[in-house]
Amino acid sequence: MKHIDEQLISACKKKDEYAFRTIYEIYAPKMMGVCLRYMHNRQEAEDILQESFIKVFLNIDKYRFEGSFEGWLRRIVVNTALNKLRDEAGKDYSLMDDNLIEIINKTENIDNEYQAYTLDDMLTAIQQLSNMNRIIFNLTEIEGYTTHEIAEKLNLSENTIRGTLSKAKAILRTNLEKNKNKHNVGQ
């Protein structure tokens, strides 16, 4: 795929519309999953996806084939989503309401402690987290950012990030158990 990506990206840099469309078709479904993990609903996620791809195509010349294209694209998507959430919250994440996102896609990088649960169990439990807990959980456990990187991104202290992550994991475990028990009672 790396060779194909390089050819497509090189064609995109030459403003080849077919290459743009192909890259979108390859990466949009996966990036939609990223958008859905951060935004309140599907419409907002679709808006972020579109805005992100516009940024990618306008800035494709800045991609230098260092690291994976998917990683570069994912950073743009995450940053676009975070900027939107930051704007909504007036740059104060504590003001965000607890609206749940409608769908959360693949959680491919989550720690082994969660591997015993089904994808549906995980998605339901993550959806039940508050916005701030969900953002920090997603950035660390799914996106793989360090505490330092998140602190810089969100303009918060590393201690706040660590504390929020710890709280998010505890709430997630509680949600998983509660949902499991609810499911077992309903059987």
Image (cartoon, helix red, strand yellow):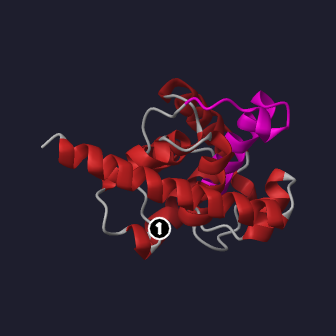
Callout 1 secondary element: loop
Q: Please identify the quarter of the rendering in which residue 90 is found.
A: top right
88 is within the stretch colored magenta: yes
The answer to whether residue 180 of the structure is visible from this angle is yes
Residue at image position (56%, 54%) is 11
**Residue 167 position within the rendered picture, expressed as x and y whole percent measured from the top left:** 63, 58
Provide the residue designation for mark 1. 109
The residue furthest left is 187
Residue at image position (64%, 64%) is 166
The answer to whether residue 105 of the structure is visible from this angle is no
As drawn, is 92 to the left or to the right of 101?
A: right
Q: Amino acid at mark 1?
A: Asn
Q: Please identify the quarter of the rendering in which residue 114 is found.
A: bottom left
Q: Nearer the viewer, residue 130 or 5?
A: 130
Residue at image position (19%, 44%) is 185
**Residue 32 position within the rendered picture, expressed as x and y whole percent measured from the top left:** 48, 42
**Mark 1 neighbour class, 10 Å CA radius: few under 14, some 14 to 19, many 20 or more:** few
50 is within the stretch colored magenta: no
Residue at image position (63%, 50%) is 133
**Residue 31 position within the rendered picture, expressed as x and y whole percent measured from the top left:** 50, 48
As drawn, is 49 to the left or to the right of 184?
A: right
Question: What is the magenta range?
Answer: 73-99
Q: Nearer the viewer, residue 50 or 127?
A: 127
